[in-house]
Image (cartoon, rainbow, N blue to C red):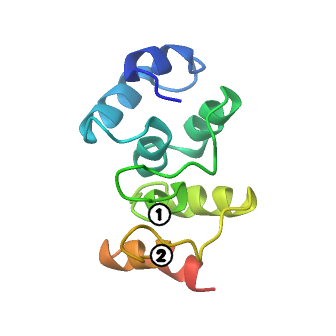
């Protein structure tokens, strides 16, 4: 499901700063699926809301085969919470993208040490 960034931000509850979400999501490349961009840049609350709206937690980015967990491994601010949340929903930390990289590889490459430790346990 592809939705314009501004329209999705308008659906978020008032407790989430809409302009902050819009800015963060617009920083990603235009073809990044919205849920993947949210896992990369936003809080768990934003991702939960998108899932409530019907987006698929098991979706993969058609451009590179990444899962939400791959993107969460790059989230420098909310990565630990995001990874814990996604693992709780059943996403596999062993999933590989089109280049055979796992989420832990993404955390390593991004030097996201706390997420790397979480994924290695």
Q: How many labels does the image show?
A: 2
Which label sits on residue 97?
Answer: none
In terms of depth relative to the viewer, which is nearer, 94 or 42? 94
Q: Position of residue 83 (x, y in %)?
A: 58, 62
In terms of depth relative to the viewer, which is nearer, 11 or 31? 31
Where's the C terminus, which quadrant? bottom right
Answer above or below: position of 31 versus 60: above
Which label sits on residue 102?
Answer: 2
Q: Position of residue 64 (x, y in %)?
A: 36, 58
Quarter where residue 119 is shown: bottom right
Residue at the image point whose x is 57% and y is 48% from the top: 59
- Binning the other alpha carbons within 10 Å of mark 2 as few (below 14), some (14 to 19) or many (20 upward) gives many
Circle 2 SS class? loop
- Binning the other alpha carbons within 10 Å of mark 1 as few (below 14), some (14 to 19) or many (20 upward) gives many
Residue at the image point whose x is 60% and y is 20% from the top: 13
Answer above or below: position of 106 versus 50: below
Task: Residue under label 1, please give it.
Answer: 70
Residue at the image point whose x is 53% and y is 82% from the top: 117
Q: Which of marks 2 and 1 is nearer the N terminus?
A: 1
In the image, taking residue 23 as reference, residue 45 lies left or right, namely: right
Quarter where residue 81 is shown: bottom right
Q: Position of residue 43 (x, y in %)?
A: 52, 44
Q: Where is residue 90 in the image (x, y as percent from the top left)?
A: 74, 61
Answer above or below: position of 104 versus 4: below
Residue at the image point whose x is 30% and y is 30% from the top: 23
Circle 1 SS class? helix
Most extreme residue toward the bottom, as rendered? Answer: 121
In the image, taking residue 61 as reference, residue 82 lies left or right, namely: right
The reply to whether dot 2 and dot 1 touch (C-beta < 8 Å) is: yes
Label 2 and label 1: CA atoms lie apart by 7 Å
């Amino acid at each position: 499901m592809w939705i314009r960034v501004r329209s999705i931000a308008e659906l978020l509850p008032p407790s989430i700063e809409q302009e902050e979400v819009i800015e963060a999501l617009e920083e990603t490349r235009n073809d990044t699926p919205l849920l993947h961009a949210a896992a990369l840049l936003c809080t768990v609350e934003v991702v939960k809301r998108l899932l409530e709206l019907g987006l698929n937690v098991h979706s993969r980015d058609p451009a590179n085969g990444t899962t939400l967990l791959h993107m969460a491994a790059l989230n420098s601010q909310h990565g630990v919470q995001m990874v814990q949340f996604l693992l709780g929903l059943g996403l596999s930390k062993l999933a590989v993208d089109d280049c055979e990289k796992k989420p832990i590889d993404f955390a390593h490459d991004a030097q996201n040490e706390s997420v790397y430790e979480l994924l290695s346990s």
